[in-house]
Image (tube, rainbow, N blue to C red):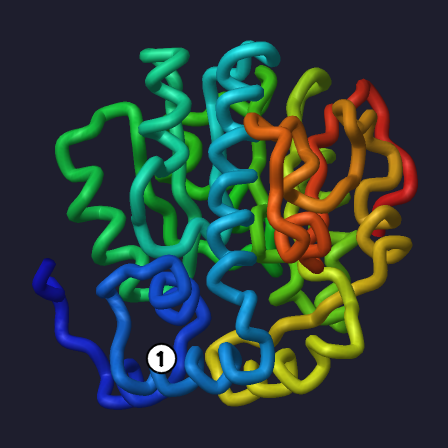
Amino acid sequence: MPHQMPLPPTFTTAPNVARMYDYFLGGKENFAADRAMAEKVLRLVPQVRTYARLNREFLVRATLFLAGEAGITQFVDIGSGLPTQRNVHEVAQQIAPGARVVYVDNDPMVLVHARALLATDAQTRVADADLRKPSSIVGHREVLNLIDWSKPVAVLLVAVLHSITDTDDPRRIIGELCAAMAPGSYLVISHVEQRPELVRAADLYRNANAPVVPRTAEEIAALLSGLDLVEPGLVRLPLWRPRELEMWPEELDAPLLGAVGRVASTRTGGG
């Protein structure tokens, strides 16, 4: 798909996290700088392609649960990344044809591709906003065109919180988002777990457009304080309501944790 707007020279020469993720998933929307950096990561952690796939499969299963069993019909996917197969709106609308979805990102390439993909879909929008400023998302015109915050909504933070540094305070961000969400809403997260073998790979992302900040299981659990976790709670991604019972060892040991939490009438432990 051709680009629809001029891009700055550094856009193609600096590694980009969304495009690297696209490369790990086998996509084609990436540049030489992204592929070179991704290959460096793969040399350190050869399982990264598997991890990217597991993360995407978790997103699909969580969306199926939300649109089905949980009865959610409005979704806000923050840090959505480049469109690929089985996007949130496609998955949700299979079960709930009236489901409304807003994709939120601040990456120019993501925005161009998402808008082109969704040009004829009246139930789906794209918003240019930054997760570090939750109010810019909650009050965004494109979000408010589809999302009614007074009714239950699912907010998806899949593979994005580990791009938020401690200085930007992910607990504050989650607290502000949950404060805007009606009781009965859901928050979905997936996050890279801190492992010794990931330290060097995470360091490589200092040269990309966003960092990777692995956190311990305890630190990730703390981000979910005050939420009622849907069974089986915070677990390695393949173990969250798996469709298949047989898994490879590298899948079961993936350094990726995920959970779906329900927002109660009041929430404590934020910020």
Q: Nearer the viewer, residue 39 or 161?
A: 39
Is 86 on the left-hand or right-hand side of 225? left
Residue 157 in picture, x, y percent from top left: 59, 46
> Taking 169 as reference, is 177 above or below it?
above
Q: Nearer the viewer, residue 59 or 142?
A: 59
Quadrant of the image occupied by residue 200: bottom right
Q: Residue at x 86, y 57 (%)?
A: 219
Is 92 on the left-hand or right-hand side of 271? left
Q: Residue at x 69, y 48 (%)?
A: 252
What number of labels is visible? Answer: 1
Q: Residue at x 29, y 24 (%)?
A: 123
> Taking 243 as reference, is 256 above or below it?
below
Q: Residue at x 40, y 13 (%)?
A: 95
Quadrant of the image occupied by residue 129: bottom left
Task: Indicate the quadrant containing the N terminus: top left, top right, bottom left or bottom right.
Answer: bottom left
> Taking 130 as reference, is 269 above or below it?
above
Residue 62 in picture, x, y percent from top left: 57, 30
Q: Nearer the viewer, residue 246 or 252?
A: 246
How crowded pointer 1 is (Cα within 10 Å; few <14, some 14-19, many 20+) is rated as: many
Is 182 on the left-hand or right-hand side of 129? right
Residue 126 in picture, x, y percent from top left: 33, 44
Kind of residue at badge 1: Asp
Q: Nearer the viewer, residue 65 or 74?
A: 65
Quadrant of the image occupied by residue 33: bottom left
The kind of secondary structure element at disc 1 is: helix
Residue 150 in picture, x, y percent from top left: 59, 18
Q: Which residue is mark 1?
A: 34
